[in-house]
Amino acid sequence: MASDDDDWFFDSVRNYRNLFMYDLQHPVTCMDWVDDKNLVVATSSDARNEILELSVPDKLLSDDSESAGLLKDRDFRQKNGGFSTSKICCIKHIPKSRQVCTSDETNTGIQVWRIGSNGTDLIKPIESLKSQHVDTSNKKCFAKIAVNEDKPACIVFGSSLNNLCCLDLEKETTHEVCDKTEFTETSIISEIKFMDQNTLISCENSGEIRLIDLRVKQDKTDNNRKSTSNQVCDKCSIWTMDITVDLVYRLSSAGSVVISDIRNGSDKILQEMNTQQQSRTKHTDISIKASPQQKQKVSLSGFDGNVYIYDTQKSPVHEFGCSFTEPIFNHQGHVKNCSDQSDVIKSLAHLWHPWKPDLIMSSGSEGSLHAWEYCLPNT
């Protein structure tokens, strides 16, 4: 192992309050919280595709650092598991239930799974749903999924605006959200989220965002945000997003972050930030997550093997005529802890803990799953 890797391990003592690193049999492609103590992950390799429910080590969730050292449970523990016939690309826990929904790379539909089916430790599929309109323009477009905390029976899924569907689990019905004749198959969705029980926000690969009222079937003129989005979004990049109660955080594959205020149905640009991160390829699984507890902090992954934390209130650095914002923390563990340094490691997925600040779960392409609570100088 190189000396700089050794230095990273020594430095980790002061850089992390907690750092747990695990090696799974297969890389974690996506994950979501079931509750504040358990998460569900999808793993995939050429040989096997699995879905697992894991419990978080008690030590990570202790508020008392002294008593945390006395807790025996320091490992992720598998509670339930199952198998998928295809690689799972998106997974969402259905609120207030023991069910999750997933999408895979084979079609634009979703599957609903029950966790711990019939008193067993199995995660089994109970329903498969396909969009009434299937995209043929891009075979790799899988369905994005939005679940509703205020209305758990309502699930929206789709890979583009013209195949977006709303599922009512209670009524066991689906209906199209948009008029498919109004949108082209190039309106590919990179992310969808619920703002409230009736309003959805979508982000297209182009960076354009739309507010969608689920009570009314949408057409191309409804809630169009082109007038503001086109002013800031580089059309040569791929964009994704995350949201908080009133803000949208968009990230491009060129490393740009755009923060918008979406209150009152507007798309008011509040801030633009250059992170200097740059994806090697245009089509990449970049991700941005806003901290649930600290609105000024966002995390980025998918550019390389690292996970970057940014403070959006931090003043940018000006050098050689360029302005950029530096990360306040860089988790390099997936790269530094890899035994084969010839491998090109990529960060695949990451999540903030729902209530504990600075605690993040992340996965790497070499099969690692890390739970880490970072520590900034003088904190």
Image (cartoon, rainbow, N blue to C red):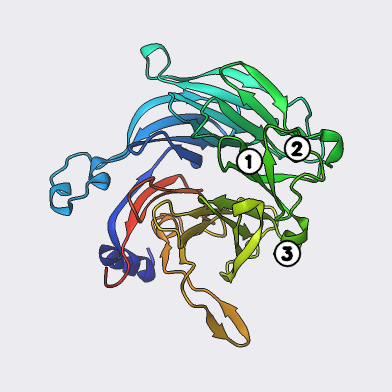
Q: Is residue 23 left or right of residue 71?
A: right
Q: For this rendering, which residue is in front, 266 or 315?
A: 266
Kindly report the distance in space between the C-alpha atoms of the residues bearing marks 3 and 1. Answer: 23 Å
Specify which label sits upstream in the sequence, 3 or 1.
1
Q: Which mark is residue 259?
A: none
Residue 199, visible in the rendered structure:
yes
Q: Would you name the residue on which mark 3 appears?
A: 234
Q: Which mark is residue 139?
A: 2
Q: Residue at x 40, y 58 (%)?
A: 294
Specify which label sits upstream in the sequence, 3 or 2.
2
Location of residue 370 in the rendering, given as x and y in whole percent from the top left corner: 38, 49
Task: Please state which amino acid type lies under the numbered disc 2.
Answer: Lys
Q: Which mark is residue 200?
A: 1
Judge whether 274 appears above or below 51 on screen. Answer: below
Task: Please state which amino acid type lies under the numbered disc 1.
Answer: Leu
Characterize the local packing of mark 3: few (<14), some (14-19) or many (20 or more) Cα atoms within 10 angstroms. some
Location of residue 272 in the rendering, given as x and y in whole percent from the top left corner: 61, 69
Location of residue 305 in the rendering, given as x and y in whole percent from the top left corner: 50, 58
